[in-house]
Image: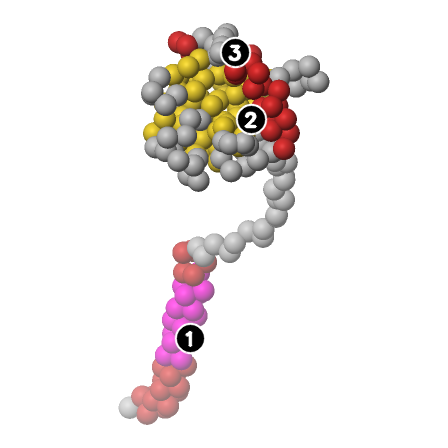
């Protein structure tokens, strides 16, 4: 890395602590699986299109002795300048207007940390809002709460009345038989009555 960038790192660390948020970064928080591609976007709408946007990485567990690692920048000649220990095959930067896009490929758990974009003005340094990246071997899943099954109450229902054909026919048959017997009795009574009336006349003849 260039000498002036090494000299710049302490000032960069101080500026990060101040937390300037003029540069907007997306996403703010990201959990990804290993060996995936991660795009990070820094938008500098308030800056000039010719402003160079630097990318830095803060370790996942920063300490008093840790510092922001310079990753890459697209300079004024549209050439990408990389940090000292950056593997260029796993990291690319492109600038489109006021946006700078950092692509991380085949990410590993060691790539976890907070990524900042930065513009250098006169005399101040402007930091982005930061993107916290976490790389894991297996993505966490949200377990669905176990639903307790409520046993269904068994209700005893009275047997529904079944209308049977025989039960309907029985009263009808009995009624017809009773009517027939009644008619026979009436007819017999009429016949006896007529016979009694006519029998003296018959004996007289």
Q: Which mark is residue 133?
A: none
Which residue is the site of mark 3? 3
Dot 1 or dot 3: first in sequence order is 3
Q: Secondary structure at mark 3?
A: helix
Per the model, the C-alpha gap separating discs 2 and 3 is 28 Å
User: How is the protein colored in the picture?
Assistant: secondary structure
Residue furthest to the right = 64
Q: Tell whether position 24 is magenta.
A: no
Which residue is more in the foreground, 107 or 121? 121
User: SS class of the residue under badge 1?
Assistant: helix
Q: Nearer the viewer, residue 17 or 39?
A: 17
Label 2 – label 1 distance at C-alpha:
105 Å
Whether residue 175 is in magenta: the answer is: yes
Among numbered discs 2 and 1, the one appearing first in the sequence: 2
Q: Which residue corresponds to the image point at 57% horizontal and 31% vertical from the top-left? A: 144
Judge depth for marks 2 and 1 and give the one in front: 2
Q: Residues within 10 Å of mark 3 (few under 14, many from 20)?
A: few
Q: Can the viewer see residue 61 in this picture?
A: no
SS for callout 2: strand
Callout 1 touching callout 3 (CB < 8 Å): no
Q: Residues within 10 Å of mark 2 (few under 14, many from 20)?
A: some
Q: Residue at label 2?
A: 132
Q: Position of residue 155 (x, y in %)?
A: 61, 48
Q: Which residues are magenta?
A: 170-187
Which residue was labeled with disc 1?
A: 182
First in sequence, mark 2 or 3: give its number: 3
């Amino acid at each position: 890395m260039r000498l002036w960038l090494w000299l710049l790192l302490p000032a960069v660390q101080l500026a990060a602590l101040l937390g300037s948020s003029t540069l907007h970064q997306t996403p703010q928080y990201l959990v990804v699986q290993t060996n995936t591609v991660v795009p990070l976007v820094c938008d500098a709408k308030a800056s000039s299109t010719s402003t160079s946007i630097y990318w830095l990485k803060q370790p996942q567990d920063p300490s008093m002795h840790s510092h922001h690692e310079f990753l890459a920048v697209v300079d004024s000649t549209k050439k990408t300048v990389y940090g000292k220990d950056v593997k260029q095959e796993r990291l690319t930067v492109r600038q489109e207007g006021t946006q700078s896009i950092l692509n991380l490929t085949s990410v590993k758990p060691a790539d976890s940390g907070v990524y900042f974009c930065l513009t250098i003005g006169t005399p101040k340094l402007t930091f982005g809002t930061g993107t916290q990246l976490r790389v894991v071997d297996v993505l966490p899943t949200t377990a669905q709460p176990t639903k307790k099954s409520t046993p269904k109450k068994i209700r005893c229902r009275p047997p529904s009345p079944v209308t049977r054909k025989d039960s309907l026919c029985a009263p009808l048959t009995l009624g017809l038989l009773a009517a027939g017997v009644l008619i026979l009795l009436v007819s017999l009574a009429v016949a006896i009555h007529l016979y009694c009336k006519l029998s003296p006349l018959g004996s007289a003849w």
